[in-house]
Amino acid sequence: MAESSIEWTEHTWNPVTGCTKLSPGCKHCYAETMARRLHAMGAAGYEKGFQLALHPERLQQPLQRKRPTTYFVNSMSDLFHEGVPDAYIDQVLDVCDRTPWHTYQVLTKRGDRLPQFFGSRRCPANVWLGVSVEDRKYGVPRIAELRKVMAAVRFLSVEPLLEDLGPLDLSGIHWVIVGGESGTKARPMKAEWADGVRRQAAAQGVAFFFKQWGAWGPDGVRRDKKRNGRELGGRRWDEFPVPVVSAAC
């Protein structure tokens, strides 16, 4: 486990590493780039670079931490990747169940697997489920799949935002995160795209978090992402959702 620089979480927990590209949001995957670096450094768990790998030896890690912590689960993979067996996901969620003092944020691009998996399973009350929404064709349809699953928090990671998403039905969604892309090959995000999502979240009573501009600023100029900052429309948006305590799958 590691402390995270991601603004909306505290630590990362990676009982799975590696992935395969699925949609345009994957094109410049930060996890793939990081995995290559870790492989070159000889880091444990990255012997095969970014190939999908299960790490059962990491399953007990959250049990060893007694301070309540928010974990982003599999920042270096996708828990619902087709190569991850249901039985292994069960083991991950069992650890979540056994550590109710922690909060777990699970984000996937395999939204179609969520209703299939949770059709016969309960979602732990401390697990927040989210889907990536980078565009209209691939991202937006994942929202409907997520909505089919009962969870304390359902959230959208609209990062990297690659186009105007148009009208969004955010019913049943509790939190929306928006961010631009980072890296040398980053694609720009327009201010009106991000603000369009923000306005719809506000109109539908959904908490909104603006994570970053990334490599391109709101003025369309490329610069260091720290210089671009985290302001949208002249202010920072750091809203967090209120979990639905009674939610159960």
Image (spheres, rainbow, N blue to C red):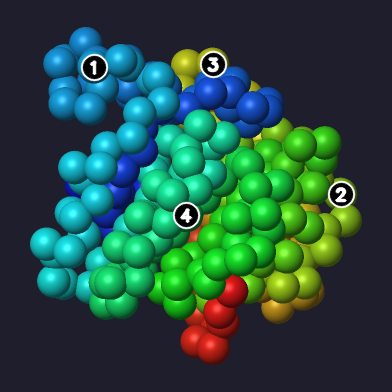
Amino acid under disc 3? Lys
Give the Cα distance between marks 2 and 1: 42 Å
- Is the Cβ of the residue at disc 4 closer than 8 Å to that at disc 1? no
Q: Which residue is mark 1?
A: 47
Q: Residue at x 76, y 37 (%)?
A: 138
Q: Secondary structure at mark 2?
A: loop
Q: Quadrant of residue 37?
A: top left
Give the Cα distance between marks 3 and 2: 25 Å
Front label number (4 vs 3) = 4
Q: Which mark is residue 189?
A: none
Q: Is residue 110 above or below residue 239?
A: above
Please rate how many residues cluster around mark 3, counting C-alpha atoms within 10 Å: few if below 14, some from 14 to 19, many from 20. Answer: few
Q: Residue at x 47, y 54 (%)?
A: 106
Front label number (4 vs 2) = 4
Q: Quadrant of the C terminus?
A: bottom right
Please rate how many residues cluster around mark 4, counting C-alpha atoms within 10 Å: few if below 14, some from 14 to 19, many from 20. Answer: many
- Can residue 173 be seen here? The reply is yes
Of pointers 3 and 1, the one earlier in the residue sequence: 1
Please rate how many residues cluster around mark 1, counting C-alpha atoms within 10 Å: few if below 14, some from 14 to 19, many from 20. Answer: some
Of pointers 4 and 1, the one earlier in the residue sequence: 1
Q: Secondary structure at mark 4?
A: strand
Give the Cα distance between marks 4 and 3: 26 Å
Q: Which mark is residue 166?
A: 2
Of pointers 4 and 3, the one earlier in the residue sequence: 4
Q: Which residue is mark 4?
A: 106
Q: Which mark is residue 185?
A: 3
Give the Cα distance between marks 4 and 1: 24 Å
- Is the Cβ of the residue at disc 4 closer than 8 Å to that at disc 2? no
